[in-house]
Amino acid sequence: MVLEHQTRLHNLLTRANWETRIALHQQDDMNRILGQPSDQWSDSTRRRIHGHAEELLKYLLFSGEAKLDSPVAGTSGFQEEFPKAGPRDRRGRSLRDLDLKTRLFRYPCSFLIYSEAFDALPTAARDYLYRRLHEVLNGTDQGKDFSGLSVQDRTSIREILLDTKPDLPEYWKRTPASDKSLH
């Protein structure tokens, strides 16, 4: 199940990376031809970048994840070894902690947020993902795509990322109540 998750998320990372680069390249060409400023984006370019990033965000947060009907157990030692490889927050929690009773992971945010593939996303896609992830985890986005995330899930994921993902934007470090930029 973990391998299936990794494969799908890496495919989404690759696609978001590729599609963002293409959209930005085509936008640069159009700006040059039309004599527009190089930092100007059309609505089409914005939709293309944000659309692929949004699909990635949903999968990153296990949106629509099927619940397990019964606990999953293995005999290979994977359940014990896999969680040891990830960074842990100051409370000892990791995005690699498995649940395997009702869902795959204890904290429904993919550990692949620490991957080179995630960090290699073009700035336009990565910035959008960080902003949207921040909105979801702070509860600003209560939409149906993220209704499976409890308040505790959102809080735990946010706290884990704040302790373990050093390149988060500065606005992540503000407390949710003091973050006026989202309201």
Image (cartoon, rainbow, N blue to C red):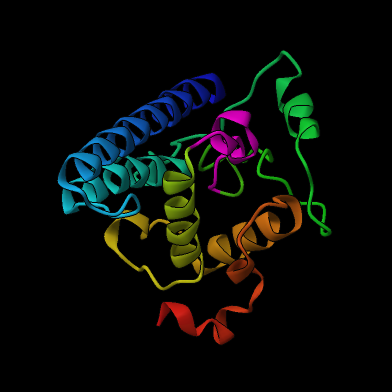
Of 8 and 91, the residue lying toward us: 8
> Number of callouts in the render?
0
Of 61 and 32, the residue lying toward us: 32
> Residue 123: image x %, image y %?
49, 45
Residue 117 visible at all: yes
Any magenta on residue 100? Answer: no
Q: In this view, does 10 lie above or below 57?
A: above
> Residue 113: image x %, image y %?
58, 40
On the rendered structure, is 140 left or right of 52? right
Q: Point out the stretch of residues depicted in magenta.
A: 108-121
Quadrant where the C terminus sits is bottom left
Q: In this view, does 97 lie above or below 43?
A: above
Tell me the quarter of the picture where residue 142 sits.
bottom left
The residue at the point 64 percent across, 77 percent down is: 174
The residue at the point 82 percent across, 52 percent down is: 92
Of 149 and 50, the residue lying toward us: 50
> Residue 135: image x %, image y %?
44, 66
Tell me the quarter of the picture where residue 11 sits.
top left
The residue at the point 37 percent across, 68 percent down is: 141
Tell me the quarter of the picture where residue 132 sits.
bottom left
> Residue 115: image x %, image y %?
62, 32
